[in-house]
Image: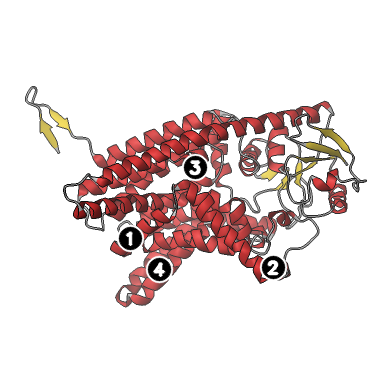
Amino acid sequence: MQAQTLETGTPKTKLNPNWLWPGGIFGLALLIRLVYALQLPFPPLDDPAYYVQGARSFFNGHPLELSIVWNYHPAPATVTHPGFDFWMPLASFLIAGSFFILGDTSLAAQLPSIIAGSVLAALTFWLGRRLLGGVGLGAKPQTFLAGIAGLYIALNPLLAYQSAVPDSSMIYAALLSGAALVWVSRESPAQSLGLGLLMGLAYLARSHAAFFVAAWGIITLVRFVKEREDRVKTFKLAVFTAIGLLLTAGPWLLRNWLTFHALSSPAALETGLINNYATLFNYETPINFNTLLQQGPGEILLTRWDALYNAWVEVLGTMFVPVALLPALGLFLLWRRNRAQLDGGLLYCLLLGVASPLIIAVASINGSMYHSAGSIAPFGAIGYVYLLYRAGEKYRAWKPEGLRLFPILMVFLIAVELVQFRVSVGGTVENHRHNEAVYARLNSWLKANNVTGPIIADEPSSLNYATGLPALRLPADESLETVKRLAERYGATYIVVTSFFGRYPAALESPNNTIFPRAYLDPQSEFEIYKI
């Protein structure tokens, strides 16, 4: 629609809110994440370093071959071996592409996450428009609420941080949110194929996409059973989705089968059988169903309670202040008004937020929930804004002449986020700079003593990233004798411990340690090095 100006009679184009809102949200999110990333010169410990080293492998002539042993189930024949039996590859693929264009720099490694995190904020607007459109709101309130939800994601300190580091979290979240948006769009073969492609790409970012695929499968099956007259159509669309999923995820699963004789590492399932994260890195002691039974019912239940607490208080409670139950309540109220479009999204949120901690409890406690929670952030933000809108409307009906409560709640919500951002960012930046200094001192000692590795370390990916030396995971729940046999098998020369994990460094510091003499203690007591 165009309007004529009186002065010239030339057309004056009105700004389209469907693009103005997401464009502004994307731009703001991009600026915040870019500035944040520039303050973080060193990646978070272990996981992001693995992705960066995976990207670097494309430039040394041996793609996806790493000198990092993250886990011994199964144990590789040599330290340098085909990687990504457990980790998913998409983050490394994208970082490698960024390296190819911009060179091997910290910012180039961070760029895929920066862009994905910014896209996530914009996708939240479009998803909000779609979901809020089915509850009887007018076009302007619908657009405004969706815009506030997108703004909440753009300003969220946890999501901004995850966007500023070279990791899979935001790549996964953006792809899953895109899949959710396509899922609630008008049904067609092209839409169904696109849904499958996005689900497959999300799986290549994080294996937690299996929960989204499960949600899609359950909803599709229920629809097939209940809507008899549309069974042919439902089946046809499901076939297109399955084709898209296989086109993206299939080649990677085939690669794993040909390389490792398994579709994926057993480590993911093993996290559901243990109650101590250090046990996951056992070298000799097997992990099986007996590992679970030996814990007893009390410990099994306590571990899962801890996982739920971590998910809903420490992760989602940080993402949605003051408590995650508020956006959950808003999403439930929205679902009651728009079940047709929210069935799948709500089911995925429940599977990730409840089923995942119960099934793979130790993994959830130690990072898998943290790294995957961004994929439900758009649903939470939309639910949160809708809850506050409903509260404002209820108050307005109760006191028609009173203050407009909803704008006050919106301002308060954004203000709390900004305060949270200000409080958290300083300590986060300082922690990254601290880790950079620690690994710089560690690297200096190793170089000064002509150490060529391999090194047994509690953070093998970070050590490999900082020093370039081959690194093996310290089996932190096993004895010194086991570590000795591990060192003999792989020819390791030193043990490096930078944190308290499992039995270490206590076992090495004990007077009973007659196997590994201490070679060096950091003057600031940040790491210890033992000679093998």
The crowd level at tag 4 (other Cα within 10 Å; few <14, some 14-19, many 20+) is some
In the picture as drawn, the residue positioned furthest to the right comes out as: 514
User: Is there a contact, CB below 8 Å, between mark 4 and mark 1?
Assistant: no
Q: Earlier in the sequence, mark 1 or mark 2?
A: 2
Tell me how far mark 3 sits from mark 2, CA to CA. Answer: 33 Å
| Residue positioned 44% across, 69% down in the render | 218
Front of the two marks 4 and 1: 1
Can residue 315 be seen in this snapshot? yes
Q: Earlier in the sequence, mark 3 or mark 4?
A: 3
Tell me how far mark 1 sits from mark 2, CA to CA. Answer: 38 Å
| Residue positioned 51% across, 36% down in the render | 424
User: Is there a contact, CB below 8 Å, between mark 3 and mark 1?
Assistant: no
Determine which residue is flagged by label 4: 220
Determine which residue is flagged by label 1: 333
Q: Quadrant of the N terminus?
A: top left
Tell me if residue 169 comes above or below residue 444 in the rendering. below
Q: Earlier in the sequence, mark 3 or mark 2?
A: 3
Determine which residue is flagged by label 2: 292
Front of the two marks 4 and 2: 2
Q: Earlier in the sequence, mark 4 or mark 1?
A: 4
Percent x, y of residue 65: 69, 44
The crowd level at tag 1 (other Cα within 10 Å; few <14, some 14-19, many 20+) is some
User: Is there a contact, CB below 8 Å, between mark 4 and mark 2?
Assistant: no
Amino acid under label 2? Leu
Can residue 491 be seen in this snapshot? no
